[in-house]
Amino acid sequence: MSLAVSLTNLKGVGPRVAERLERLGLHSVEDLLFHLPYKYQDRTRIVPIGSLRPGAEVVIEGEIEASDIKFGKRRSLLCRISDGSGSLLLRFFHFSAKQQSALQRGVRLRCYGEVRRGPAMLEMVHPEYRQISEAAVVAVDENLTPVYPVTEGVAQKSLRQLAEQALALLKQDKVEDYLPGELLEELGLPSLQQALLEVHQPSPETAVAELLAGNHPAQQRLALEELLAHHLSLRQLRHKVQQHTAPPLQPEGRLRQQLLDLLPFTLTAAQLRVIKEIDADLAKPFPMQRLVQGDVGSGKTAVAAAAALHAIEAGYQVAVMAPTELLAEQHLQNFTAWLQPIGLKLAWLSGKSGAKQRRENLALLESGGAALAVGTHALFQDEVEFNQLGLVIVDEQHRFGVHQRLALREKGSHDGRVPHQLIMTATPIPRTLAMTAYADLDSSVIDELPPGRTPVETVVISDQRRDEVVARVHRACAQEGRQAYWVCSLIEESEVLQCQAAEETAALLAEALPDLAIGLVHGRLKPAEKEALMARFKSAELDLLVATTVIEVGVDVPNASLMIIENAERFGLAQLHQLRGRVGRGSISSSCVLMYHKPLSQQGKLRLAALRETNDGFEIARRDLELRGPGEVLGTRQSGMLRLRIADLERDKDLLPDVARLATALLQRWPQNVAPLIQRWLGDSQRYGDV
C-alpha cells in the first residue's frame, strides 16, 4: 500500500473519523507520518510517591488506604494511595457507582497522571489507572509514549493506533526524502525514514532526556526540514514580489533637504544609514519590501518622512497606515508639521471622519491634490482611489491582517506597476524570529537613540506600597515641575469596563492629589476630546495623565519623566517596554514604576525582572520569545505561518545558518525538490504576505 493513499484505508477510519482527521489537516497516510508528537510521556519507570514534585507527569504504584466521597461545590471521589515512601490523593469529579465500588481500601493500583498541589497533600486529578494484583509482576512500557495534537472526536489513543499502522506501512514503502544524501551526510543527520520511525516510536535505547528536550538527532533532522520549508516558501514569495514592477524613484532630493533644514534636531548616523538603504531600494524597478525596526524613540517617523518625500518629489503619492486612531493621529500631526511648511497637502482618513471631511479627502486623493494620506484601515476601503500611489508605509505591521496590507498595495497598482512598501515596527523582533518570519523582507535596524536621552530607571514594587507611589507622583509634579503618566491595566476585555476602571483610578488620584491637574484618556473618548486632552498634557496644562493603554505608542512629551503602570503583571513584556518608552524622551532622568498585585506568578516575576534589568528592546524581545513563543510575539494574525509542528525557534536557532545554506543549495542544484518540500510541511495554508 502506498503512503499517498487515503486514511480510509487504515483500520478504524470510516467516513466520520476521516472527516474529523481532516480538521487536523490529515488526508493521507503520509500526512499522518508528519503529524508529529509535540511531547512525550515517560511511563518507563515507577516513581516513589515520597519523591514526587508538583508538575511532574509520572507512573506511581500503591495501595488504596482510604476511599471517600466528599460533598461540596462539586461532588468528588477521593482515594488516598500509599506505597510506603509517601501518600497521594487521587481525585475524581466524574465517576460511576461501579468505579466507586472498585476503588476500595486494600485495592492496588498503577496510575499515570500529573502531580498537583492539593489543599491537604499532593494530588492526581482523573489519572489513568489500572488495578494490579500484589503477586503479578506488570511490566512498565519499554518506550516513551508519544502525545499528538488532537481534535474533538479523535482521542489520543486512536491517534497512537493509527500512527502505528502508518509506521508499519512506512517500513514497507519508503517516504520520499527531498534532502539529498550528500547534504545529510555533511550535517551528520539521519535519513527521513529513520527520523520518522524514531520520533513516533522511540526505541528503548533512546536518550530520554534528549528526546524530552527536543534535542535528539531525529527531532533535529525534522526540525531542520520544517524550518527549511518555511524559509524556502518566503524565498519564493520574495522572488514572486520581484517579478512585479514598481516605479524606480530617483529624485534630486530637494524636498528632503528642505525637511532636514526645518527639523530642530540632526538625524543620527543610524537613521542616515537606513535612509540610504531605503533610497537604494526605491531606485530599483521592482517593489521595495523593507522592514525597519527601531526601539522606542529611535526616530522611525523621521526616516519614514524622508522616504515619503523621496517618492513625492518623484511625482508619486504616499499612504501612511497605522493600526489605531491615536497612532494615526500622531503621524498626522508629525507629517503635517513637517510637510505643510514645504507646501504639501495631506489627506486624513479614519473610521471616525465626518462625511463632508471624508468626501473632501477622497477627492484630494483621486485628483492627486494630496501628496500624502494618513489613516487607519479606512485607507483600503473600496471608495478610496489614489491618483498615483508610489509608496505605502505601514506602521506596526503585525497588527494588520495580511489581506489588509495587500488590499492597500492593490490600490496602488497602476499600468501594471505596484507601489513600494516600507514596514515599520517599534517592537524589535529577535534575529531568530526575523530570519524565519520575515525572510521575504529586507531588514534595517535603527540601533542608535538620539543624543541626550537618559536610560529610564525601572522599579518593581507591590501595590501594598501604593501610598508611597502616590507621594512620589506628588513630589515629581508639584515640587520638581515634571509630568507623569498613570496607566491602568486591562482588568476586563470589555472596553467599557476598562474605561470605568480608569475613571475610578482618576477619581481616587484626584482625591489624594487635590493640587494637581489630572486628565483622563481612554478608548471611548471621541478623537477630538482625546486630541484636546493630549494637547493639554503636551503643553503642561495637566500634571498627571491617567490612561488605559491607548498611550502605548506615538505619544511624545519630553517633560513627562515618571510612568506608573498599575497591575504590571497583567501586561506582556513588549507592551510594558512600549509604555515605558513614553518617558525618558528628554534629557531629564526618568523613572518607570511597575506596580504588581500579589501573588506574582513565575512568568510574571520573569517579565518584570527583564524590564528592571534592561532597556534594550532587542534583549527584551528575545526574552519575550522565550516566555511566550513566536505566535504570541508576532501577533496572532500572522502567526499561522509559525504553527510549527516540531521545530522551536528559540531552541533550534543554531539550525538557522544551515537552513539558509541548504535553501540556496536546493534552489541551485535540486530545484525540483523545493515545491514538494514546501507542500509537505505547509500544505495549502495561507502564507504570510502571499501574492
Image (cartoon, grey):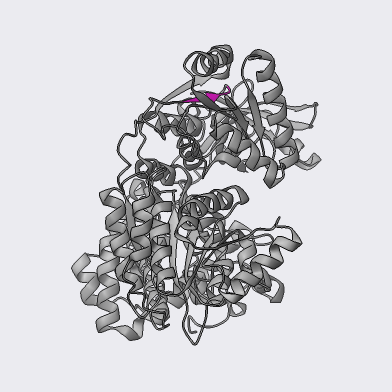
Q: Residue 317, percent across and down? A: 50, 71
Residue at (63% x, 14% y) in the render? 515
* Residues rendered magenta in the picture: 592-597
The residue closer to the viewer here, 291 or 433, is: 291
Residue at (57% x, 19% y) in the render? 463
Residue at (58% x, 81% y) in the render? 6
Q: Residue 268, percent across and down? A: 29, 48
Q: Residue 134, percent across and down? A: 55, 36
In the rendered structure, the answer to whether residue 13 lies left or right of residue 60 reads: right
Q: Indicate the quadrant where residue 276 lies.
A: bottom left
Q: Is residue 206 visible?
A: no
Outermost residue to the left: 186
Q: Is residue 327 magenta?
A: no
How many marks can you see?
0
Q: Residue 318, percent across and down? A: 49, 67
Vertical relation: 579 (above or below) 173: above
In the rendered structure, the answer to whether residue 408 lies left or right of residue 258 reads: right
In the rendered structure, the answer to whether residue 636 lies left or right of residue 673 reads: right
Q: Indicate the quadrant where residue 478 lies.
A: top right
